[in-house]
Amino acid sequence: MGDNVIAIGNANGVGGPPTVVSGAITQLNQTITASDQLGGTETLHGMLQTNAQIVEGDSGGPLVNTAGQVIGMDTAASSGSFGNTTSNVGFAIPIKRALAIARQIRNGHGSPTVTVGPPGSSACWCRPRRRARPAARRSSSSCSSASRAAAVSPVRRA
């Protein structure tokens, strides 16, 4: 706690060069409830909390320590105004857990907390299977990391 960090992302999803904001780790092992724009919610455990100004569009970007090591993946943010002060709180998934989730997705393994494929499906629609499938679902190659990442049910993204 108290370690300086840099959050890198795509603030507000506008593209262009990455945005870089600095801050510090303010809490460890936080539990948050994140929401998406459609009103869905998800409870996330073991999160790193930072005062780096993570905003919508930064999700998936790295949270880096001063040694240049990726320590987390920007995930969610909460900001609000209380009187004359503004509060900016960002959250990141610790990198070991983020990598474990990435391996799970890459291998096409869903779980109660990770959906691979369309919501309600337990299979990756773009991963080749040995048995014949309808042409609409057939693919000649494995999922790219981007298409698998897009298949994960979203929470309110930072």
Image (tube, rainbow, N blue to C red):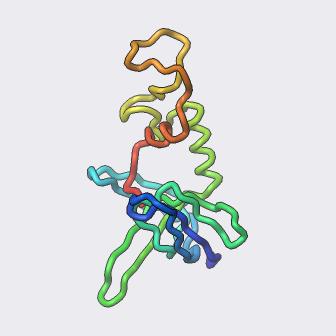
Tell me the quarter of the picture where residue 32 sits. bottom left
Please say if 145 is above or below 89.
above
Q: Quadrant of residue 65?
A: bottom right
Instruction: Point out the residue furthest to the right here.
Output: 67
Residue positioned 37% across, 56% down in the render: 156
Residue 112, given in percent of the width and then of the height, sits at 46, 39
| Residue 33 visible to an observer of this rendering | no
Task: Tell me where residue 152 sits by quadrant.
Answer: top left
Camera sees residue 13: yes
Indicate the position of residue 84 as horizontal and vertical percent values.
32, 90
Residue at the image point whose x is 47% and y is 57% from the top: 59
Q: Seen in the image, is 95 located left or right of residue 157?
A: right
User: Which residue is most to the top?
Assistant: 132
Residue 1 image offset from top left, x and y in percent? 62, 75
Q: Position of residue 73 (x, y in %)?
A: 55, 58
Q: Quadrant of the C terminus?
A: bottom left
